[in-house]
Image (cartoon, rainbow, N blue to C red):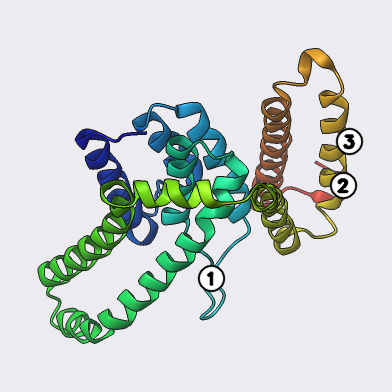
Amino acid sequence: MEFNFVQVILVFIVTFIAAIDQFDFTESLYQPIVTGPIIGAILGDMNTGLVVGGTYQLMTIGNMPIGGAQPPNAVIGGILAAVFACSLGMEPTAATAAAIPFALLGQYGVTLFFTLRAPLMESFRDAAIKADTKRITVLTIISEVILGLIFAVIVTLFFVAGQGVGQAVVDAIPAWLNTGLSAAGGMMRFVGFAILLKIMMNRDMWAFFLLGFALTNIVAAIPDLSSPTLLIMALIGFGIAFWDFQQQTELKGAIADGGDMSDGI
């Protein structure tokens, strides 16, 4: 697939914004479920981009930095996974697995960037002591722009010089290894979700988990409902969560008003 200049610029801009959002905007624009369909739309295959973004998102959903250990970078990994799938014709799961090495390299780049930026912290500290908000703003903008450019340049290099190399690498992958990559990519999303469950699950949540598991299997077994199963379960989950929120809010309001809880009123 040949890329035109507009596509290269648009991917550069998306990567630049996503990189800054990960550390500054924090609006979740950098999440693969967001960048995947955007990259897919830019490359002319939004459906594939959405599938790859969702697959990569499930893999990263339980990843979080712990101490000095950093997970693979979601910005570079998610965007390149969509690029691999849309431009090189790779299966979404295989593209997800193939993007992991690039995500790791991206995270190493982030670590190196923050290490080299460490001396700049003294400038931030000096500006804070002097209550110089304008200087803090300028230093922050410069820092985030450099970070965004690092991410954008890494991804854009694939468009400018790496397409032939990328296609050659894909063509050189034997069938058995490609099958293994697909299996690994498919497994990663379940591993990511399992990590998330391990962190957030407690005794109070197991009833909802088992209820959701049972309802999902029942809905998926009905032919007319099998396609929108995920949407149906999301709506049911939202309904239960909203009902619980209302109940908890009313209970706290009753307690705050000094109601007599002994008789249930």
| Vertical placement of residue 5 versus 27, above or below | above
Which residue occupies the foreground of this view, 36 or 82? 82
Query: In the rendered image, is residue 170 in sight?
Result: yes
Q: Are marks 2 and 3 in contact (CB under 8 Å)?
A: no
Could you say where residue 47 lies in the image, as x and y percent from the top left? 51, 27
Q: Amino acid at mark 3?
A: Ala
The residue under label 3 is: 214
Instruction: Single out the mark in the foreground, 1 or 2.
Output: 1
Q: Amino acid at mark 2?
A: Ala
Residue lying at 50% horizontally and 54% vertically, measured from the top left: 99
Could you say where residue 29 lies in the image, as x and y percent from the top left? 40, 46
What is the CA distance from the residue labelled 2 to the residue labelled 3?
11 Å
The image's mark for residue 207 is: 2
Lateral position of residue 209 relative to residue 21, left or right: right
Could you say where residue 159 lies in the image, as x and y percent from the top left? 30, 46
Quadrant position of residue 46: top left
What is the CA distance from the residue labelled 1 to the residue labelled 2?
29 Å
Q: Amino acid at mark 1?
A: Pro
Could you say where residue 230 lies in the image, as x and y percent from the top left? 70, 30
Query: In the rendered image, is residue 25 in sight?
Result: no
Residue lying at 62% horizontally and 48% vertically, measured from the top left: 58
